[in-house]
Amino acid sequence: MAATDPLASFAATLDARLTSDGVVVLSPLDVERSLTLLTAVAVVAPTLRADCCMLDPWYNKGLGGTRDDYTDYIVGLLDGAARVAPHTYLWGFPEIVARFVDRLPEPLTLTAWLTWYYKNNPSVIRGWRSAQMTCLHLSRPDGVLHPEAFLNEAQLAKQAEGKLRYLPGPPSVIESALLVGFIGRTEQTGHPSQKPVAVYEPLVKMATVEGDLLVDPMCGSGTTGAVARTLGRRAVLADVEADYVTMVEQRLGIRRLTVPATVLRALDRT
């Protein structure tokens, strides 16, 4: 493809920013366009093929708005995520994400039902104090898991000697306190639904290795980017809310990468 092609030029700029900063946040962009953009970028620049996509949409319960076609909308996002990366994580309350288990677009299948467990939620819902959130780990057939990332030193020694009889992975319940009050105060950004770094770390370790590329088209406060930096991964982040893009810039000390209008027009024609 010609060097003057807008998409190829943007891909080269994105690659350069990832090389220098490790994490890139795009100018405000809705999730569908973000997924379409990243799919197209991977075609012209195979080194920018993503390895994992994080989806943390609003939960259709007021905050973020509601829509009657929410289920179909999320299924459409999953279809887009499957085109971007071999692994996708979908967050939500259990009663919300449960409906998607039987609605997964091909070629995604359920790898694991994960639970984030926390004790310190002050909110009471219908008499019960909610203490969990769900994350579906969804994979394409080419998705590779990395349970070896969770071996301790003794297990690694046994593995080196050929004496490790089984490969233990992390538990499907991740326990970490909510970022409220004085808990995780140094990590808090003011985002209304920010998740702790400790919750994202095992997800990233299971689906990627160092140098792999994460994408988060609904990045909120930028936790995916923070974890990518800690674990030696790269990340492309996006969000439709300008305030959140600014929040990510301040949190990670980076500046946004503007998607040129010529690129957006080209996407609209596809």
Image (tube, rainbow, N blue to C red):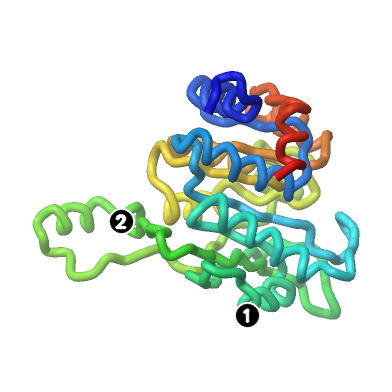
The quarter of the picture where residue 101 lies is bottom right
- Three-letter amino acid code of the residue under disc 2: Glu
Percent from the top left, x then y, of residue 70?
81, 67
Residue located at (13% from left, 53% from top): 160
Residue 175 in percent (x, y) is at 55, 62
Q: Is residue 14 left or right of residue 74?
A: left
Whether residue 253 sits left or right of residue 203 in the image: it is right
The residue nearer to you, when weighing 182 against 227, is: 227
Helix, strand or loop at label 1? It is loop
Q: Which mark is residue 102?
A: 1
Question: Does any portion of residue 250 appear in the rendered image?
Answer: no
Q: Earlier in the sequence, mark 1 or mark 2?
A: 1
Residue 54 has which mark? none
Within the image, what quadrant is residue 89 found in? bottom right
Q: Residue at x 55, y 23 (%)?
A: 2
Image coordinates for residue 134, horizontal then vertical, percent: 63, 68
Q: Quadrant of the C terminus?
A: top right
Q: Residue furthest front?
A: 2
Disc 2 crowd, CA 10 A, few/some/many (<14, 14-19, 20+): some
Looking at the image, residue 180 sits to the left or right of residue 164; the answer is: right
Name the residue beneath numbered marker 2.
Answer: 148
